[in-house]
Every structure is written in C-alpha cells, then in structure tokens.
Image: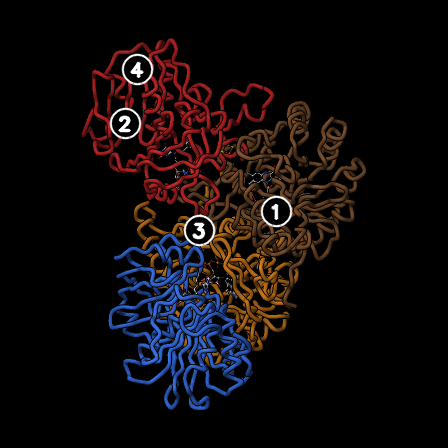
Chain colours: A brown, B orange, C blue, D red
Amino acid sequence: MLNVKIKDIKFNNPLLTASGTFGYGDEVKSLTDLSKLGGIVTKSVTLEPREGNPPPRIYETTSGMLNSIGLANVGINTYCEQKLPFLNSLDTKIIINIAGSSLDEYVKVLEKLEESNGVHVGYEINISCPNVKKGGMQFGVDCSMTEQLTKRLREKTDKLLIMKLSPNVTSIQEIAKASENGGADAVSAINTLVGAGIDINTRKPVLNTTFGGLSGPAIKPIAIANILKISKVVSIPIIGIGGISNYKDVIEFILAGATMIQLGTINFSQPHRNEEILIQLKNWLNKNNISQIMDLKGAVECYS
Amino acid sequence: MLNVKIKDIKFNNPLLTASGTFGYGDEVKSLTDLSKLGGIVTKSVTLEPREGNPPPRIYETTSGMLNSIGLANVGINTYCEQKLPFLNSLDTKIIINIAGSSLDEYVKVLEKLEESNGVHVGYEINISCPNVKKGGMQFGVDCSMTEQLTKRLREKTDKLLIMKLSPNVTSIQEIAKASENGGADAVSAINTLVGAGIDINTRKPVLNTTFGGLSGPAIKPIAIANILKISKVVSIPIIGIGGISNYKDVIEFILAGATMIQLGTINFSQPHRNEEILIQLKNWLNKNNISQIMDLKGAVECYS
Amino acid sequence: MIREIGQVVFNREIAKHFFEAEIIAPLISSKCKPGQFINILPSSHWKNVMRRPMSISFQDDEKIRIIYKIVGEGTQLIGNWKVGEPVDLIGPLGNYWKGWEGYFPILMGGGVGIAPILNLHYYLNSQNINHVLIMGARTKAEHFLQPSQNENIFLTTDDGSIGVKGWITNALNEFPFDPLKSKIFTCGPPLMMEAIRKLALDKKIECDLALERLMACGFGICQGCTVEKTNNEKGTHSYRSKFALACIDGPIFSSSELVTC
Amino acid sequence: MIREIGQVVFNREIAKHFFEAEIIAPLISSKCKPGQFINILPSSHWKNVMRRPMSISFQDDEKIRIIYKIVGEGTQLIGNWKVGEPVDLIGPLGNYWKGWEGYFPILMGGGVGIAPILNLHYYLNSQNINHVLIMGARTKAEHFLQPSQNENIFLTTDDGSIGVKGWITNALNEFPFDPLKSKIFTCGPPLMMEAIRKLALDKKIECDLALERLMACGFGICQGCTVEKTNNEKGTHSYRSKFALACIDGPIFSSSELVTC
Ligand SMILES: Cc1cc2nc3c(=O)[nH]c(=O)nc-3n(C[C@H](O)[C@H](O)[C@H](O)COP(=O)(O)OP(=O)(O)OC[C@H]3O[C@@H](n4cnc5c(N)ncnc54)[C@H](O)[C@@H]3O)c2cc1C
Ligand SMILES: Cc1cc2nc3c(=O)[nH]c(=O)nc-3n(C[C@H](O)[C@H](O)[C@H](O)COP(=O)(O)OP(=O)(O)OC[C@H]3O[C@@H](n4cnc5c(N)ncnc54)[C@H](O)[C@@H]3O)c2cc1C
Ligand SMILES: Cc1cc2nc3c(=O)[nH]c(=O)nc-3n(C[C@H](O)[C@H](O)[C@H](O)COP(=O)(O)O)c2cc1C
Ligand SMILES: Cc1cc2nc3c(=O)[nH]c(=O)nc-3n(C[C@H](O)[C@H](O)[C@H](O)COP(=O)(O)O)c2cc1C
Ligand code: FES
Ligand code: FES
C-alpha cells in the first residue's frame, strides 16, 4: 500500500531521509530501524575532502534552524573506501548526494561512483546549497547550467538521476523544466532558504558565514507551494522536502504532487519519527479506505 | 534616543505598522495608543474598489500564517472621501500604501492622493503582493519595470517614496538597486513569501487561491538575510519587515541595516505590542549605554 | 473593545468533553452583550500567530464565562488554566443577538454553539421574555442542562439517550409555534446551522445564525474571516457587501443574507 | 546510544537557581559513563527543532540525575516536569572522562558545569581514588555541597560568602599538589574554562575540559556542534581534524588540542 516507483526502482515506502540530516546511516542505526526506510539520501560528497565552515554553523530559529555546515565531508576517495562498504551493507535503498564547484567536478564524482562497487540506486545532485562560496547554488539558479549539468551526468549513468532544486529563485518551474529537459529522472525540492540572524549582544551574525540555510517546520508552506508549482510544469516525479515532521505533512506533500518525500531537520530531534509516520500513514489510509498511497498523488482539488 | 529620519521626515521612533495588518488605525485605536507609533502604513489602496478573494483567505501555519486577502479595499475615491479625514486626524505619521495592476494605475492613485487634502508623509508602493492575479508581484520581480514605475511616481511627488520589495526573487539586490536608481527615498522589505497548504481531509487547498503569502516569526531569518543583502548594495534607507514580534527583533533588524521597521502579523494577536517594544527598547539602550538607536544601524560585525 | 487581563475563578468539566471557565474581567463583562465573543491568548508562551476566539456564555457585572471543547493545542492550554491565573483577553468582539421584539424567540444551540445561545437565554430570562431553548448533542453525557417542559427547555441527542432523538430540528415538533411570528437564534456546527437555515428559509421563519470562521485578529484588521453574502448591494464598503467579515459584520448573520453557513 | 522514555522520580530546587531531576532510565543509566550527556525533549509539545542537552550528574543501575539552571523555554519546561511524568531522552551521548591513572585528579566545576564533574566525583569515590573537588559559584546560596577539608571538597564564591573568595582557580592554592603529577577535569562557563585551560597550559598541568556547543542532534549527524582544534593532523576524517564535533568527538577535549573554550 505504501510502495512507490521512480523509473524502474521500487521503494518500500515514500520516506527518504534528506541529505545532511541523517549522516551515512551509521550514526543513527541504534536509534531507528534503517530497513524500514524507503531509502537514505547521503550527506553531499565532493571531489576533495572539505572541512566545512568555521563555527558557529547552526542556530535555532522560531520553528526552524539555520545551518552553514558548508558541505563538510571526507571527499570522494575516502568515501568510496570507507563509506560505501557500510552503505552497501545496509538493508535499504541508497541515493548518493553529490555537490561540486564546477560542472567537471560533479561529473568526476559521479564517474568515480559509477566505477565503484557501490550498490546505490541513484544520485541526488545538489545544485542548491546556499552555504558554499563557489558552486552549489550558482547552478541551481541558472536554467542553462542546470540543463547542461543534467545532460552531462545523464550520459554517465543509468541509475536514478535526481536534481535537487533551490527555492531561492524567481521561478523554480524553469529550473525544474531544465532538469527534465536534461534527462533527470526526478527532481527533489526544496533545499534550504537563504536566512540569517544576528546576536544583538555580540553584534555578530549567528553563523560564521553570516548567511545560511533555513529548514524545519517554518518553511513547510513554502515547500508545498514549490511542489505545487513544479508539478504543473514537469511530468517526472517530484520528491518533496521541507519541514516535514509528521504523517499529515507526508500526505500533504503527496496531495501537492510529490511521489516521495524526505525527512530532514526532524531527524535531529526525532530520529525514529520515520517509523511512527509509517504506522500512522497505514492507519490513516485504512481509515479512509485508500488502498494505495499513490492514489493521492497530486490529488489536491483546487478551488478553480 | 529613538527618533529616526528618512529624507527630511522625522519619526518619533522606528516602529511602523505594516500594510494590511493594522487597518487604517480606526479599528485598533481602543487597543493601543496610536500617537506612540512612529507611524502607520495603511492597507494597500487601488484605483477601483476590490472585493478581494473568496474565502478561505487565511490559514495558520507553524509560527506563521498564510493569507490571500487579495487587496480587498474601498478604492481610491471612497478612500479619499472616508478614510483620509480619519487618517488626517491621527496624531501619528501616515504612509499610504498603493497597489495596482498597471503602471498607469499606480500613477493615477498617487495623483489622486497628491491632489487630496491628505496630510500623509509618504507612499509605500506595493510591487510585491503575491495574492492578486495581475500586477503586484509581476512588477516586483522585474528590474526595469521597477525602475520605470519608481521614476514615474517620483515625478509626481515630493513626499516619501518607498518601494516595497518581494523576497520571491533570485536577487532582491537588483530590484532594490532599480528602486534606488528610479529615485525612491527608501525600500521596505520583505513582503510575504509565496506559500501554500492542503487540508488532507478535504483535499482542498487551505486558501481559495491555492497560493498565498507567508508571514510571521517563521520568516524572520529570511527577512534578516534580505535586509543584509540589500544594505550592501543601496545607500537609501531600508525599512525592515518580516516576523518581528519583540524588541530584540527590532534591534536585530537595525543591526542588519534597517533604519525603521514594520510590525505586521504580530498586530493581530498583540495589537499593543508596539508600546511594550518602545519601553523595552529604551531600557535595553540605557542598559547598554547606547544614546541613539541609530548608532546600531548596520552595526553587525561579520566574521570576515 | 479592549485588552483586559482577566483572572480565572474556576475552570471545570461540566459534561463529557465540555469545559467551563469563569473569568473576572470587569471591563469586558460590563460592556458585552449576548452573542459577542472574546479573543484569547491561550498562554503567555503561545507561539502561534492567532488567538483563540470563544463566545461569552454568561456575564454579570464582574465576570464572564466561556464553554469550550478541547480540540487542539490552544484549547488544551485553556484547559490547563489554574484558578487565579491571569489570562489575556480582547473583547467584547462582534455583533450581538437582537430583534426579538414582536417575535417568539426559539433558541437552538448545538455542540459548543451552546455558549452564545445560553447567554441569550439568561438575558431573555432576566427580561422575562418567554422563549424556547433547544440544546442538541450527540449523547446524554454531553448535556449539562435538564430538560424541562415547564421552562421550555428541550434537549435532543443523536442516540436518544435523553430528550428528543435525532436532529436538533426534530425538537421543533415538540411545542406549538407560529412560524411567521417566531424567530430562530442559533449557533452550532456548520452542518446543523445549514439545516436550520434551510428550514427557516423554507418555512419563512426569521432566523439569525452565529457563524464560526478562522480569525487572525477578531477586530477587523486582517480581513481573513470572510463570509460570503448573497446580496451584493453597492454601498460605501462595496468590498464588504459581497465578502463580509465574521468578526465585525458578524458573527451573527441573518439566514437570508448568507450563501452558506 | 538509544532513545529511552524515562520516568521522573523527583524534580526539585537544590540551591538558588539550581534544580535537580532524577529519572528512571535503566537502559541509559546502565550504559553511561561519567562525562556523558543525554539529549532531552523538554515536552511532547516541544515545537523547537532541537532537543536540550544535559550532562548526567549521577547514575546508578536504574536511574540518572541531571542538574540544571532555568535559562529559557526548554529548561522552563523541564522545570515543570512532574513526578511520574514520562520524558523522552536520547543517550548516553559523547565521550567520557578518562586518563586519571598515574595522576592526582583535580575536579573543578562551575555553574551548571558541576553536573558532569559531580558524576566523576562519585565515581572516583566509589573506586576509592583520592582526588580534590572544587566547586565555584557566584554566592553561597548557589552552592548545595558543604566544604570539607577532610573530604577534599573546596568551594569558591565570587563574593566570598562561603569558601574561597574569587575565581575558582584561587582554590588551587588551598592544597598542595604537584602540577606534573596532577590532572584537571573541568566543566563550567566558557570564560572560567578558558582561564583554567590557560593556567593548565602555563603550569603544564594535564587538563581535560567538557565544552558546550549548540547541538541540533547530539549524535553526529548535523555537524553543527563544531569545535576548532589546533592540530591539523591529516587523517581519514580530515574534515574533522580541524573542526571536531562536540557531540561525538567531545564534549571532553584536552587543553592542548583546543583553540579556545
Ligand atoms: C466567533 C467564534 C466563537 C467561538 N466560540 C467558541 C466557544 O464558545 N466554544 C468553543 O469551544 N469554541 C468556540 N469557537 C471555536 C474555537 O475558536 C476553536 O475551537 C479554537 O480556536 C480551537 O483552537 P485549538 O488551538 O484548540 O485547535 P486547533 O487545532 O488550532 O484548531 C482546530 C480548529 O479550530 C478552529 N480554529 C483554530 N484557530 C482559530 C481561530 N483563531 N479562529 C477561529 N477558529 C479557529 C479551526 O476550525 C481549526 O481547524 C469559536 C470560534 C469563533 C470564530
Ligand atoms: C553537552 C552539553 C551538556 C550540558 N549540560 C548541562 C547541564 O548539565 N546543566 C545545564 O543546566 N545545562 C547544560 N547544558 C546547557 C543546556 O543545554 C542549555 O542551558 C539549554 O539547552 C537551554 O535551553 P533553553 O531552551 O532553556 O534556553 P534557550 O533560551 O533556548 O537557550 C539559552 C542558551 O542555551 C544554549 N542552548 C540552547 N539550546 C541548546 C542546544 N540544543 N544545545 C546546546 N546548547 C543549547 C545556548 O547557549 C542558548 O543561547 C549543556 C549543554 C551541552 C552542549
Ligand atoms: C544541518 C543540515 C545540513 C544539510 N546538508 C545538506 C547537504 O549536504 N546536501 C544537501 O543537498 N542538502 C543538505 N541539507 C538540506 C536538507 O537536505 C533539506 O533539503 C532541507 O533541510 C529542508 O528540509 P527540512 O526542512 O525537512 O530540514 C542540509 C540541511 C541541514 C539542516
Ligand atoms: C493579512 C495580511 C494582509 C496583508 N496585506 C498587505 C497589503 O495590503 N499590502 C502590502 O503591501 N502588504 C500586505 N501584507 C504584508 C505585510 O505588510 C508584511 O509585509 C508581511 O506580513 C511580513 O511581515 P510580518 O511577518 O511581520 O507579518 C499583508 C500581510 C498580512 C498577514
Ligand atoms: S478576524 Fe481579522 S478581520 Fe475578522
Ligand atoms: S550536535 Fe549534531 S553533529 Fe554534534
């Protein structure tokens, strides 16, 4: 009743964990049963190791948080050596999130992963990270760059190719279309919104980098609006992200047009929430006599 | 200690009320002392009366709300007849917010107000309303339209001319610069963010118009980021708006670069909050030996 | 309309799922009229952007009461109010019941819609105005009044466990009245009110209904609590003749001016 | 590390501004070691996105305790915990105190930093390991221990109202010790720890410090609780040799590896 399909890949349920909010699964495995998840999207990996931004990197806001981790990660070589074996051993689907500072960098990382012995089912391409100086968001705000990047990556892989979109643009529809035109199998949205805060006593920004990404329940209405907009212009599946914290939110995203969803910030305080959501989703579907969750996909009934 | 100046206009303090969240002052006058305010920005007025969008028009979200009022208002003629005399009688500064569906419409409304006997000190131009089909946001996302509109209005008035900016763009800096180039005395930011929600039981959007504007504490980090960005590129004053609910928020906006601020959604549940804020601001400034609140303007100390 | 910090006198369960709180609030209580409501800050830590509106169910010179059901976070916090606790209220808000002169008032309250109906009932009693009070609920345990033929108090329950079985409108068969000389005052769940509205239009009974709408402010500044009206008379407030505001043009509307409840 | 629903045994004020709660949490208490912490959901209605970390101040086979100060909303909710209430915990988290073999342990706790220090004190006592315990506070009312020359317990206060007057480091003059054969274990406000760290580096005393950082998760997945380290040794986790994570690489660090507290 909960299983969903993107291209030829079957997922047991529509729940993924969002990149950067679930590590590589190893840290969390004593807190939740990973095999119950639809899948895990891993923390962004880049060509070179990155130490990330200096502290402070996170801050709590009203019903949300700011982060500027800055893509801290071990780099693709160490990743293949040390993280892949563990990921391979997990009883859930793995989607590897890739970030880069140039088209070539993205392509190289993907190539290395294609040559690796990873059993991951696909890639999520982070073209929307607001927390690094070069790369990241500069792709996600430009249609032709997005299309070009998608095309080049498409040539290199038959695995799932998912472009992760930024909400920090005038028209997310155009970037979504560019992704579809480039050959992406799906788009995921949204990444964090650009935000900032200032400590009034020290007069310093709450983040070392001044600007960071806003996530959490505060942004859910913005995420829903973006899913609705994207679903009007593309026919590839959409993976909904942004402030999801309970089963009702999951249904709301699916009604808006999402095929799958990702749990992000909620994992920090409720790493087991995915299990609760699965039970509650089933109960709700039963109570409402809905046999397949995908019957709800895009089933919103607009007023006019 | 709290007074501020924009062009030649002196305000007793930096607190304004945001358009659409304080009516015309008449409804609220038994709940708060209007003369204590720095000023009131009135609900958007348009050339013709508008009945606004059908219900439902509002919805509560996590630490925020969605609205799609749709610029319901009496139209400029009735406005001049019935609202202006009351506004004239108020012991506080009045800024009249104008919206329109075309350049000409904005200009006509402003002309009528210039010819009226209003004693308002200026205009705030709403080029950023996400809740009407035509006009509103279409201006606020386009630089040359913004500059053109600002120029035409500038020709018609010597009163304060404030352009109200939308955060729903890739680069708010460009729109801010266009406003400055067009001759605006100040910019105000931000208007609401495009958001949506779906009732999972009825499958209907929570707003009749599907999309609406998100406001409230949830959006404060986004507003602060926008103020910081704008303050880097323009030299005219910035009026900060977005999720302000206490005196600390006011200081945060001023540190980020705002000269004045507007209280919006908070007026609905705490219409007297402005009075509390003024007292707390004074106490805080005294405790910190700051003689003028404007000493804090833009005083954020970024890490690098 | 003012903001007043009231003080809780009591806060207790009066029937299954129904709670009643009494609050000392002399400024509001001395001004309010039956049918009006207050807008409540459920707690000083309240992080939502909207207060929670509640009808006034009783008033004297010093105190007011509310009757409420716990449905979400706000009402849960209200349920936690302790005796003596200060509570932040704005009121009195909205219009009030009127126009019973020359009519036989039939008061019909269902669910938590009983609150403003009860206050009208007390008022009519104090004025010795003869009337009927009908209260509807799902089952006996949800009723806190006793039926009384003498006092013209009728109860209905969905399951017949007390009073008349079935819809609240069934109770209209229990006593004689002249439709053309009677007027219904009602508040309750939308479906119930819509049934009463249609019946009233059908039988040409005058009928005023108190509606609920989501309210951000409660005093006319957010323009969110829209009620669609049938007649589009052009007036000064043209924009409010089609879409009225439940908080200042209502919450009480006449059956004929509404598109739906 | 697991999630456990504990049950509150008591929750009381033990000194001015200081509260102590005891929680039945057998899974966590049977695994944790002095220096470790738990991450707490202050209430089931908690709307913030982060839990609130607290050090374990006492442990037996079944129960743990925390000592806390009320500083904001989260600790206020914790202060409201009732006896018997279920509370949602993740733990045990972080590394733990170690490396006292061959050293004379000097335990120094200030403010709420006393919690993990106290747990180490209990542990060393249970192992009959001779050590000194120094507790610092602003004033007498904030202390809940008695000074005792016999048991090597020293108190300091800013105002001299009990124990040694002035900074906690002043207490180091109260007893003889050999810097090269002693090791400081400390937790407290950043300024205090920074002073101790500098003193330790200066006098070449071994010193481990438990730091506080804002934590979104507490178990290594958000990468937000960054601690800047001096040595940039290239290792497998190159990205964590410059910026360590307080929740899994710490909270306890050695004075020499830190840039600042
Ligand atoms: C004029 C008026 C008078 C009312 N009188 C009573 C009364 O006497 N007794 C009573 O029990 N209830 C009354 N209500 C309904 C009451 O306001 C809601 O039950 C209450 O707001 C629920 O809040 P919550 O946080 O517990 O639930 P939530 O979970 O937040 O909401 C549950 C439902 O309550 C309604 N609601 C929530 N917030 C508001 C709001 N700001 N304005 C209007 N409706 C809201 C919505 O329909 C919502 O779907 C009245 C409503 C109005 C508009
Ligand atoms: C490893 C560790 C152990 C701690 N042990 C104790 C202890 O034993 N006793 C004690 O009283 N306090 C302890 N703290 C501090 C405690 O976590 C904060 O006092 C508490 O989180 C404040 O929450 P609040 O909602 O009441 O205040 P808020 O108003 O939300 O915050 C006040 C301050 O508390 C800190 N804080 C808030 N949230 C967090 C968070 N998620 N992670 C870290 N710090 C935060 C921040 O510095 C913030 O500025 C510890 C912190 C850490 C990191
Ligand atoms: C601490 C943190 C780190 C993140 N790191 C990444 C990342 O490395 N790559 C990426 O594509 N998204 C990253 N994100 C964005 C999330 O995957 C997600 O898109 C966003 O947080 C919105 O979802 P949420 O509101 O449910 O958290 C990160 C988010 C947070 C909060
Ligand atoms: C119900 C409502 C109505 C609004 N109407 C207008 C309007 O008519 N014109 C306008 O320029 N902005 C309007 N706004 C936007 C506010 O002025 C303000 O920019 C926005 O709400 C963000 O501030 P806040 O988070 O403090 O509410 C409206 C906002 C709300 C919530
Ligand atoms: S509730 Fe705001 S106008 Fe009615
Ligand atoms: S708190 Fe999340 S990694 Fe340390």
Which amino acid type corresponds to the residue marked 3 in the rendered image?
Answer: Ile
Front position in the image: D205 or C42: C42
Query: Where residue A207 sits: x, y (%)?
Result: 50, 39
Q: How many marks?
A: 4
- The chain carrying label 4 is D
- Viewer-nearest of labels 1 and 2? 1
- Name the mark on residue D191: none
Mark 1 lies on a secondary structure that is: strand
Mark 4 lies on a secondary structure that is: loop
- Name the mark on residue A241: 1
Callouts 2 and 4 in the same chain: yes
Residue visible at 67% across and 58% down in the picture: A299
> Does the image show residue D244?
yes
- Viewer-nearest of labels 4 and 3? 4
> Does the image show residue A170?
no
Q: Which residue is mark 2?
A: D136
Q: Which residue is mark 3?
A: B254
Q: Which residue is mark 4?
A: D131
Query: Where residue A293 sits: x, y (%)?
Result: 66, 51
Query: Where residue C57 sits: x, y (%)?
Result: 34, 70
The answer for how far apart the CA atoms under marks 4 and 3 are is 52 Å
Q: Are marks 2 and 4 in contact (CB under 8 Å)?
A: no
Front position in the image: A203 or A77: A77
Which amino acid type corresponds to the residue marked 1 in the rendered image?
Answer: Ile
Mark 3 lies on a secondary structure that is: helix
